[in-house]
Amino acid sequence: MKYILLICSLLVFLIGCSQSYPKEEFDPSYQMYNSVLQNFIHGEKVDYKLLKEQRAELDHFILQLAGAKLEKMSEDEQLAFWINAYNAITLRSIIDNYPVKSIQNIDGVWTKVKWHVADQEVTLDHIEHKIIRPTYKDARIHFAVNCASIGCPPLLNHVFTGQTVDSLLDVVSSNFIMNKNRHHIDFEANTIETSELFSWFWEDFVSNYNEQIFQNKSDVESAMLNFTYTHLSDSLRTKFSKDVFWKITFAPYDWSLNDIER
């Protein structure tokens, strides 16, 4: 009898585990997640209320993440996968707690809440700081991963893929540099007001943009200026003089939710 009870207990345990992490076949075209981005992103804002009401596609995509096989992906496909996974989980975290004024109000959203992705348990912090940053060593990713906040670079309304990830990283970087509300360059006063992202992740920018084009600057300021110069439009790059002293300030980060206005 005790063996029967033991077997029953084991079956209950296994069933419970399978219910905790149900899997769907991963779709490498990201069709379902792309539909979410197309339908609920409006400019630089997200319609979280409507997304919460019509969440089926996002929920299915989150389940798909569990069964992704990274070993079958190229390096670019893996980077695209992790960016998409991070952003989708962030969207899911918001609607699971909506209405909320800021992602900062969700307890443990970055460090405690675990998600089953590619046969492993991860948090948002783990994806960003243990996988994406150290593995791919590309400062442009800071303009691709989205923290659901006004101060964060806007979320694209289409997915990253292995074929598009490099070009889209350039797009999101240039979008940020060319956006006066996020990176304001005053060519007359030689001033730049930009995001604290550059100071928070200065190591990434210094390692990627460490050419000494701009003189008499700290490493982080020089890297930010090099990044700016690289991602400006051709017409503005000619105005961005390397021979003047640029005064740089980092604007306080706006953590309010990037929700549409009602």
Image: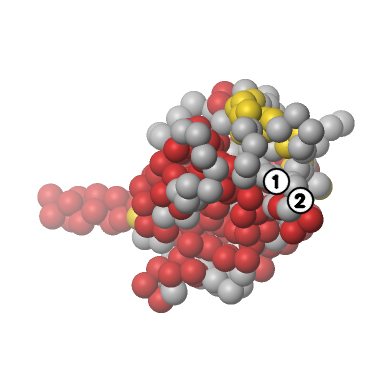
Going by the image, does 17 lie left or right of 30?
left
| Residue 12 spot, x, y in % from top left | 31, 51
| Residue on which disc 2 sits | 236
Quarter of the rendering containing residue 196: top right
> On residue 240, which mark appears?
1
Q: Amino acid at mark 1?
A: Phe
Q: Which colour style is shown?
A: secondary structure
Q: Residue at x 65, y 54 (%)?
A: 231
Quick one: 82 or 234, which is closer to the camera?
A: 234
Quarter of the rendering containing residue 261: top right
Q: Amino acid at mark 2?
A: Leu
Mark 1 and mark 2 in contact? Answer it, CB < 8 Å: yes
| Residue 233 spot, x, y in % from top left | 74, 56
Going by the image, does 147 lie left or right of 119?
right
Q: Residue at x 70, y 46 (%)?
A: 240
Residue 144 position (above or below residue 262): below
Answer few, some or many: residues within 10 Å of disc 2's Cα (few below 14, many 20 plus, some between 14 and 19). few
| Alpha carbon distance from label 1 to label 2 | 6 Å
Q: Residue at x 51, y 43 (%)?
A: 223
Confirm whether residue 192 shows in the render. yes
Query: Which SS class for mark 2?
Result: helix
Q: Residue at x 36, y 51 (%)?
A: 134
Going by the image, does 248 lie left or right of 43?
left
Tell me the quarter of the image containing the C terminus: top right
In the displayed orientation, state which residue is furthest to the left.
Answer: 2
Quick one: 214 or 158, which is closer to the camera?
A: 214
Confirm whether residue 18 shows in the render. no
In the displayed orientation, state which residue is furthest to the front.
Answer: 243
Answer few, some or many: residues within 10 Å of disc 1's Cα (few below 14, many 20 plus, some between 14 and 19). some
> On residue 6, which mark appears?
none
| Residue 239 spot, x, y in % from top left | 75, 47
Query: Which SS class for mark 1?
Result: loop
